[in-house]
Amino acid sequence: MSLGADLTRVAIGLLMGMILPRLPLLFFTRFLILERDIPPHPDPIPISLPLIQRLLLMRRIHLMGWLVAIFPLCLGIMVLKTSPQPFAFGLVAGVAWFALTRLLPLHGGQGFGLLPLSKIKQINNLREPETECCSKSELQWEIRAIRCKNCRDVTMNSPRPDLGRIRSDGRILGSFRILLMDGNSAFPPTDDSVIGQRVELFGKVAEEE
Ligand SMILES: [Zn+2]
């Protein structure tokens, strides 16, 4: 076997190992009709019971990825035990890469996983906040943060993750984005980085004008 063919087999195995565990995220909500209670992508979602239910569902789907990962991992290890197949090596490496990207937090200060229960609880508490930002407080989750629709006050500095809605950028491009970002938001939390601080600054300038 030539080196080129071996490398191709490793690459195909690698891709499969990385993509297979993310399939639940791609298909589970998007191809079932679950859009009744929340507004379509990319509109902001009101902080309400349907959002909390959707967050819990997305958390379950993320955990399901680990179950799906067992299959390519076991297959790869079983094959490698008998013979050093490049495809099986790629498969195991792909699953290992998936595990690493899921386990390492994307941004500092983020809890374990994309949707830690503590965060869902925090958002649930916002349904009945202790202090109202204004007289007509209406909290909603926008792309970058949870803000009040009326006074624009930021209640929680947290970019919105993928919530399983059918994406406005189309099925193919949308699926590709989700595979790349693993359901995370493409934006960093606004106070997390220099870029974030600049974005915030720009936002303030834009609002003042
Ligand atoms: Zn307000």
Image (cartoon, rainbow, N blue to C red):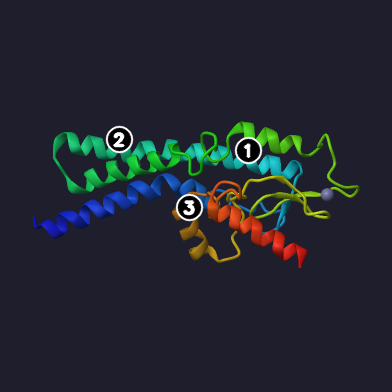
Horizontal side of residue 173 vs 135, given as left or right: left
In the picture, measured across the screen, residue 89 lies left or right of residue 135, that is left
Q: CA distance from mark 2 to mark 3?
A: 25 Å
CA gap, disc 2 and disc 1: 28 Å
* Amino acid identity at mark 3: Met
Which residue type carries mark 2? Cys
User: Residue 141 at x, y = what percent?
Assistant: 70, 50
- Identify the residue position indicated by label 2 in the image: 74
Q: Indicate whether 144 appears above or below 51.
A: below
Tag 3's secondary structure? helix
Pointer 3 residue = 181
Residue 105 at x, y percent in the picture: 48, 39
Say if residue 37 shows up in the picture: no
- 165 and 140: which one is in front? 140
Residue 80: x and y, percent? 19, 38
Q: Earlier in the sequence, mark 2 or mark 1?
A: 1
In the depicted view, which residue is nearer to us: 106 or 183?
106
Circle 2 or circle 3, nearest the eye: 3
The residue to which callout 1 is attached is 56
Residue furthest to the bottom: 209
Q: Residue at x 87, y 47 (%)?
A: 134
Where's the C terminus, which quadrant?
bottom right
- Look at the numbered disc 2 and give the secondary structure of its residue: helix
Q: Is residue 178 visible?
A: yes
x 63%, y 31%: residue: 118
